[in-house]
């Protein structure tokens, strides 16, 4: 079989890239290790930047997003006895939208099916070959048959653990691990807040997010090797009430439907192009989730890459030649912002560090310049 672009990985990056290329008349085939149901059910990111929302609307994916997405003007920043609203709309004229990665994935899968774009789910042993010459990818399909797809270009959208990055010999890598993790919790209960709360607390960071008017999402800072069995539902609600509490406010509780521990790291690998292989999204970079950049950064990469590949496949390689360098500018901006939010809000170090964090939080809510810097990065720089 032959196609123009083989896309490895059908997460948001791979699915969106195949959609954007399809709109330009470029053929692609998606290869995904998991089943479609598994990919669709993975609970991950929840916040879309203004530019991500605009892009999804522009490419015909705004239907359900416009009905079910919840537009937020900003976020609440909190530390003991203080809760302050940072209003992005007042500061920079842009908002963010709560719309889960599960929903973005569902919309992208529906669009792919409607357009009849080919995808192989449950693809095993996906292997990239000759990426600097005439590339092809081999795999075993869900019936056990060995297959080969030849292409002009291969794009690795296969996340942090996928095989694509390993096809680049000696990439340069920058990495930071953090001495904490998040316990993520999904609960069938109406949110107890209008907009997200990011809370610094002596016991550790806590966040109140949401997925819909009836479903809340929470995160608690825990140890990186935390045993989830030690977190009963009661213990989770007690910790959330304590860390998110301010006078005159109560946390509504309800049945917990999912809980998991998420590791935290910053990671950047370059180049993002090697011959006829390109990387996009988590395959090339990981940010810690504080600041909600992971999914949005994957969208920014593929938006850039779709234009670059379209031009390149029509004979103009200029954008494609610049892809890695151009993409990395935004990657490093988001890497810095995510590191900064993470460092400001999580309990680590000693009491000196705590005083620096509290000073930074006070500065962020009292200085328009400081608040604007947060708003600009959180709501997302232009694509
Ligand atoms: P992915 O979504 O990881 O998609 C990669 C795809 O490649 C997957 O479907 C995978 O199955 C497939 N794949 C892997 N190996 C192979 C192979 N060998 N062959 C074929 N296919 C393969 N971001 C936030 O902003 N907020 C959050 O709260 C948040 N929570 C997260 C929780 C978890 C557990 C994780 C892992 C990430 C979270 N993120 C969060 C980050 C965000 O979800 C990612 O940045 C986003 O999913 C990136 O999209 P992607 O398409 O690049 O990668
Ligand atoms: C969510 C995750 C984040 O990392 C974040 O900064 C905000 C919201 C969420 O899952 O809702």
Image (cartoon, rainbow, N blue to C red):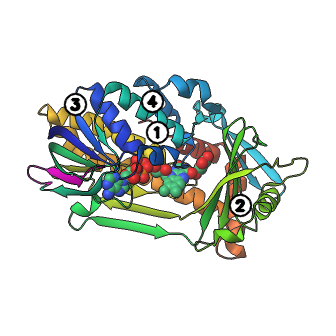
| First in sequence: mark 4 vs mark 1 | 4
Residue 337 seen in the figure: no
| In-image side of 171 versus 81 (left or right) | left
Q: Position of residue 353 (x, y in %)?
A: 67, 71
Q: Which residue is mark 3?
A: 26
C-alpha distance separating marks 2 and 4: 38 Å
Q: Which circle, 4 or 3, is nearer the viewer?
A: 3
Residue 310: name its quadrant.
top left
Element marked by disc 1? helix
Residue at 37% in and 49% down: 329
Q: Which circle, 4 or 1, is nearer the viewer?
A: 1
Residue 242: name its quadrant.
bottom right
Q: Position of residue 311 (x, y in %)?
A: 19, 32
Magenta stretch bounds: 131-142
C-alpha distance separating marks 2 and 3: 51 Å
C-alpha distance separating marks 3 and 1: 21 Å
The reply to whether discs 4 and 3 touch (Cβ–Cβ < 8 Å) is: no
| First in sequence: mark 4 vs mark 3 | 3
Question: Residue 105, which numbered label?
Answer: 1
Q: Is residue 66 above or below residue 120?
A: above
Relative to the observer, which residue lies in front, 264 or 113? 113
Relative to the observer, which residue lies in front, 302 or 144? 144
Q: Position of residue 323 (x, y in %)?
A: 26, 45
Residue with the most extreme bottom position: 350
The reply to whether discs 3 and 1 touch (Cβ–Cβ < 8 Å) is: no
Relative to the observer, which residue lies in front, 49 or 92? 49
| First in sequence: mark 2 vs mark 4 | 4
Residue 73: name its quadrant.
top right
Q: Which residue is mark 2?
A: 359
Crowding at label 2, few (<14), some or many (≥20) Cα neighbours within 10 Å?
Answer: few
Q: Which circle, 2 or 1, is nearer the viewer?
A: 1
């Amino acid at each position: 079989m032959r196609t123009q672009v083989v896309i490895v990985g059908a997460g948001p990056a791979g699915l969106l890239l195949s959609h954007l290329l399809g709109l330009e008349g470029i053929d692609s085939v998606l290869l995904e290790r998991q089943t479609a149901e598994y990919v669709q059910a993975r609970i991950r990111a929840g916040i879309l930047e203004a530019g991500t929302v605009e892009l999804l609307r522009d490419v015909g994916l705004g239907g359900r997003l416009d009905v079910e997405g919840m537009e937020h003007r900003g976020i609440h920043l909190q530390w003991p006895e203080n809760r302050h609203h940072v209003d992005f709309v007042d500061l920079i004229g842009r908002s963010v939208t709560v719309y889960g990665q599960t929903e973005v994935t569902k919309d992208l899968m529906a669009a792919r099916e409607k357009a009849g774009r080919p995808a192989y789910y449950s693809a095993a042993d996906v292997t990239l070959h000759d990426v600097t010459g005439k590339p092809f990818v081999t795999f075993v399909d869900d019936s056990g048959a060995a297959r080969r797809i030849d292409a002009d270009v291969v794009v690795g959208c296969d996340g942090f653990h996928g095989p694509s990055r390993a096809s680049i010999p000696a990439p340069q890598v920058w990495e930071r691990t953090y001495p904490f993790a998040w316990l993520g919790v999904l609960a069938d209960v109406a949110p107890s807040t209008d907009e997200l709360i990011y809370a610094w607390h002596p016991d550790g960071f806590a966040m109140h997010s949401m997925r819909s008017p009836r479903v809340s999402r929470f995160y608690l800072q825990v140890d990186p090797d935390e045993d989830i069995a030690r977190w009963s539902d009661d213990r989770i609600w007690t910790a959330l009430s304590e860390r998110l509490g301010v006078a005159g406010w109560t946390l509504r509780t309800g049945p917990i439907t999912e809980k998991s521990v998420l590791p935290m790291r910053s990671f950047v690998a370059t180049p993002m192009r090697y011959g006829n292989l390109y990387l996009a999204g988590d395959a090339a970079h990981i940010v810690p989730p504080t600041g909600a950049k992971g999914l949005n950064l994957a969208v920014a990469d593929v938006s850039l890459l779709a234009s670059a590949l379209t031009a390149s496949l029509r004979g103009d390689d200029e954008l494609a030649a610049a892809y890695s360098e151009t993409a990395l500018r935004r990657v490093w901006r988001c890497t810095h912002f995510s590191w900064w939010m993470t460092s400001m809000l999580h309990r680590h170090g000693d009491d000196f560090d705590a005083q620096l964090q509290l000073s930074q939080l006070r500065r962020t809510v009292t200085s328009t310049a400081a608040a604007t810097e947060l708003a600009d990065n959180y709501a997302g720089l232009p694509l």
